[in-house]
Image (cartoon, helix red, strand yellow):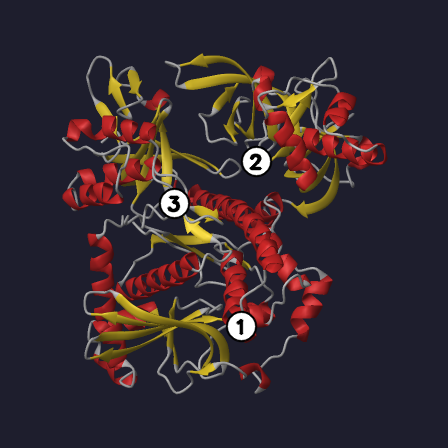
């Protein structure tokens, strides 16, 4: 890696002019014996898009050649955008100059022009650096002399040509997996071969399986991973408990959803004269997942568990996630435990972080805990041995919430959907999940624990993975201010904006007609949270230092920092080990961020699919909903059960409507009638396309 950096450093110098391969070797004094290695490194840099070779066979840095490197995001209409690696403005790519790039590919772009007041750029893809889509899932379509696969992912605008000998005897309409053998060049279609037939879309489970294949997700584990999981002990032994603090006499409970099976966090509390002693006990997964073992490598590859309506795709095999690592009631379990002394103002006055062993006394659900707090006589009697602890937890969580709100933490209250399926995977109900006080207890305790651990290791200057959330860009804030100006609202201090500005605005409009519309547009103003080896704070939480520590069964960054924490608890790593850990956390943070996005997209895809299936027999029915988004082609309406549908501009027959982009509003040319986010409308379901996950509404005539 040092040689790669040395070459790049040389080419970045102001004195460098484009040189041939041999000229660079001479200038860098490359020994003749190392010339083959030097050539290989130059080829690797070229393959990665770091450097390019001109027509005159001279080498230069990509950025100095005026090219932009980034990820191509395709659109079903053929055009796309490139999101640059350097964080600059996206580049619009017309369909005619996409160069055969497919959604997700890493590409090099030549900027051809700037459009829309110099705010957006237009470009041409000159090279695909790395193909993202090695396989594609889609519908098999057999013609007389040839066959195609039409991708499920509508962002892949080209069908895949399948030679006669490569069909695996798939039938018309089959969902299949295709291995890409040639990507095409924009003028010719990609080619591939069918490697797996999933079945017809109407067959039970094929719909979700197709999404899993599309996003490279599998419920099955490699044989060596399964073998290692089966070899793990089923119970905690005396030798496992050496050098651990014994918490088994403490009153410790888990609080989770009724259907949760991987219980990776437990809590305990004691009220003191000066405040509270809060214990957060997290499953010690790394005791069973050794560094660089098959289990560890597979967990790293997956990055996270993925949750669908009908199944979970776990990061770890069930023998661990639902077995020895899960903090099940009344059995011994190994933990990393954080004990925090907290005053009555919510300040952590001191804490310990240590290896522990616990035995939870109850496996509580959110609903039961909430009912106990509300005074349900039957449950208060049944759980009288932990009732006072639960009330103390509720008390402390209210203090912590108030303290977090005062520092400017932003709290959105967007509903989540619960999709109920029958035994054949058909959705029979969709409703809005309710968030109660028990959810708030766990949320506040986990946030505080994550902050406490992150702060400790930040000040230790140890290699670490932080959860960061960058503040919004000035351009994003300007766009947001333009939108809310007509409502007499504004965000100040754009250069050094504080999250409290956004939080105060939400408080100001709480329970008013503006709350829904402003909250939605505000959320789109923010960047996505991600993982990083560098602590850059968490804007949304108004936290200077944050990490993910509390879910090692289902998130790899949590598991990774557990291993680092235990290493520092045992002894200070030497310089060589610290260097290795720094390289590891950098790679793990980047990979885990990508895995998280992939999982979220897959979860959203299945949710949209099941919602579309649910609405199939609702055509003609009327609902009242709220406009959730406005575009130049129509507006989306969200129903009370969280399902969204599109009212197309072409269906607005009473006028010609103009789209005002900055105001996110459609306005009638003659009537002046407007449609904007937050408006309540009555609609009828007009059409459903489950293949495209699309639901169409029309405004009700009544």
Separation of disc 2 and disc 3 at Cα?
29 Å
User: Alpha carbon of mark 1 to alpha carbon of mark 3: how far?
Assistant: 31 Å
* Residue that badge 2 annotates: 153
Residue 623: percent from left, percent from top: 29, 41
The residue pinned by badge 3 equals 469
Which residue is found at the position 68% from the left and 66% from the top?
226
Cα separation, mark 2 vs mark 1, equals 48 Å
Q: Does dot 2 land on a helix, a strand or a loop?
A: loop
Q: Residues within 10 Å of mark 1 (few under 14, many from 20)?
A: few
Asked whether the viewer can see residue 49, the reply is no
Q: Secondary structure at mark 3?
A: loop
Mark 2 or 1: the one toward you: 1
Instruction: Between label 1 and label 3, give the one nearer the viewer.
Output: 1
Q: Is residue 646 above or below residue 355?
A: above
Name the residue beneath numbered marker 1. 570
Residue 204: image x %, image y %? 58, 53
The residue mark sitting in front, 2 or 3, is 3
Of callouts 2 and 3, the N-terminal one:
2
Question: Is residue 199 in view from this perspective?
Answer: yes
First in sequence, mark 2 or 1: give its number. 2
Circles 2 and 1: CB atoms closer than 8 Å: no
Residue 83, position as x, y percentages in the image: 50, 29
Query: In the rendered structure, are the residues bearing label 1 and label 3 in contact, judged by CB atoms less than 8 Å apart?
Result: no
Query: Which residue is more in the foreground, 592 or 582?
Result: 582
Q: Are marks 2 and 3 in contact (CB under 8 Å)?
A: no
Where in the figure is residue 191, as x and y percent of width and height? 73, 29
Q: Report the disc number at residue 396.
A: none
Q: Quadrant of residue 4?
A: top right
Local crowd size for mark 3, using a 10 Å CA cut-off: few (<14), some (14–19), many (≥20) = many
Pick the front one: 502 or 365:
502
Above-or-below relation of 70 to 300:
above
Q: Which quarter of the image is occupied by the C terminus?
A: top left
């Amino acid at each position: 890696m040092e040689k790669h950096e040395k070459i790049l450093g040389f080419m970045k110098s102001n004195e460098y002019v484009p040189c041939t391969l041999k000229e660079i070797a001479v200038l860098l004094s490359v020994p003749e014996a190392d010339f083959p290695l030097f050539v290989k490194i130059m080829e690797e840099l070229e393959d990665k898009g770091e450097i390019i070779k001109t027509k005159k066979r001279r080498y230069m840095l990509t950025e100095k050649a005026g090219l932009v490197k980034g990820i191509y995001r395709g659109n079903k209409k053929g055009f796309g955008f490139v999101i640059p690696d350097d964080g600059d403005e996206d580049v619009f790519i017309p369909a005619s100059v996409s160069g055969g790039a497919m959604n997700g590919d890493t590409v090099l772009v030549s900027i051809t022009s700037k459009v829309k007041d110099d705010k957006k750029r237009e470009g041409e893809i000159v090279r695909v650096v790395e193909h993202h889509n090695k396989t594609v899932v889609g519908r098999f379509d057999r013609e007389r002399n040839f066959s195609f696969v039409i991708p499920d992912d509508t962002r892949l605008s080209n069908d895949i040509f399948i030679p006669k000998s490569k069909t695996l005897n798939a039938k018309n309409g089959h969902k299949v997996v295709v291995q890409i053998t040639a990507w095409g060049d924009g003028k010719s279609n990609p080619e591939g071969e069918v490697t797996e037939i999933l079945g017809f879309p109407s067959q039970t489970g094929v719909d979700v399986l197709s999404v899993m294949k599309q996003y490279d997700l599998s419920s099955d584990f490699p044989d060596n991973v399964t073998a290692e999981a089966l070899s793990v002990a089923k119970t905690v032994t005396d030798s496992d408990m050496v050098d651990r603090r014994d918490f088994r006499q403490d009153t410790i409970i888990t609080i989770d959803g009724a259907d949760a099976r991987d219980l990776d966090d437990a809590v305990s509390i004691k009220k003191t004269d000066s405040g509270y002693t809060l214990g957060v006990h997290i499953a010690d997964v790394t005791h069973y997942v050794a560094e660089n073992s098959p289990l560890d490598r597979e967990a790293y590859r997956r990055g996270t568990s993925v949750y669908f309506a009908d199944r979970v795709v776990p990061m770890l095999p069930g023998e661990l996630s639902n077995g020895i690592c899960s903090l099940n009631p009344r059995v011994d379990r190994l933990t990393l435990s954080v004990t925090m002394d907290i005053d009555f103002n919510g300040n952590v006055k001191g804490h310990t972080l240590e290896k522990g062993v616990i035995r939870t006394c109850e496996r509580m659900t959110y609903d039961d805990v909430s009912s106990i707090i509300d005074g349900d006589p039957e449950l208060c009697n049944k759980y009288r041995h932990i009732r006072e602890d639960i009330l103390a937890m509720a008390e402390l969580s209210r203090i912590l919430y108030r303290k977090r709100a005062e520092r400017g933490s932003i709290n959105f209250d967007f509903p989540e959907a619960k999709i109920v399926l029958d035994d054949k995977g058909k959705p029979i109900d969709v409703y809005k999940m309710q968030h109660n006080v028990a959810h708030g207890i766990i949320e506040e305790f986990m946030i505080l624990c994550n902050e406490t651990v992150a702060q400790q290791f930040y000040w230790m200057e140890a290699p670490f993975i932080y959860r960061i959330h960058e503040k919004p860009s000035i351009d994003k804030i300007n766009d947001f201010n333009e939108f809310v100006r007509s409502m007499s609202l504004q965000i100040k201090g754009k250069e050094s904006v504080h999250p409290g500005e956004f939080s105060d605005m939400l408080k100001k409009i709480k329970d008013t007609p503006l709350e829904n519309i402003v909250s939605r547009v505000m959320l789109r103003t923010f960047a996505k949270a991600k993982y990083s080896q560098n602590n850059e704070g968490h804007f949304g939480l108004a936290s200077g230092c944050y990490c993910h520590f509390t879910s090692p069964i289902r998130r790899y960054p949590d598991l990774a920092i557990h291993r680092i924490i235990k290493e520092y608890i045992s002894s200070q790593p030497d310089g060589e080990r610290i260097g290795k850990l720094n390289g590891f956390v950098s790679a793990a943070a980047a990979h885990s961020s990508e895995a998280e996005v992939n999982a979220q997209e897959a979860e959203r895809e299945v949710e949209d699919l099941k919602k579309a299936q649910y609405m199939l027999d609702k055509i003609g029915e009327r609902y009242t909903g709220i406009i959730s988004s406005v575009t130049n082609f129509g507006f989306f309406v969200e129903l009370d059960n969280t399902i969204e549908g599109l009212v197309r501009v072409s269906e607005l027959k009473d006028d010609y409507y103009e789209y005002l982009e900055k105001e996110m509003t459609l306005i009638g040319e003659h009537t002046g009638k407007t449609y904007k986010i937050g408006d309540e409308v009555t609609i009828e379901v007009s059409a459903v396309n489950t293949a495209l996950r699309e639901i169409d509404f029309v405004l009700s005539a009544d």
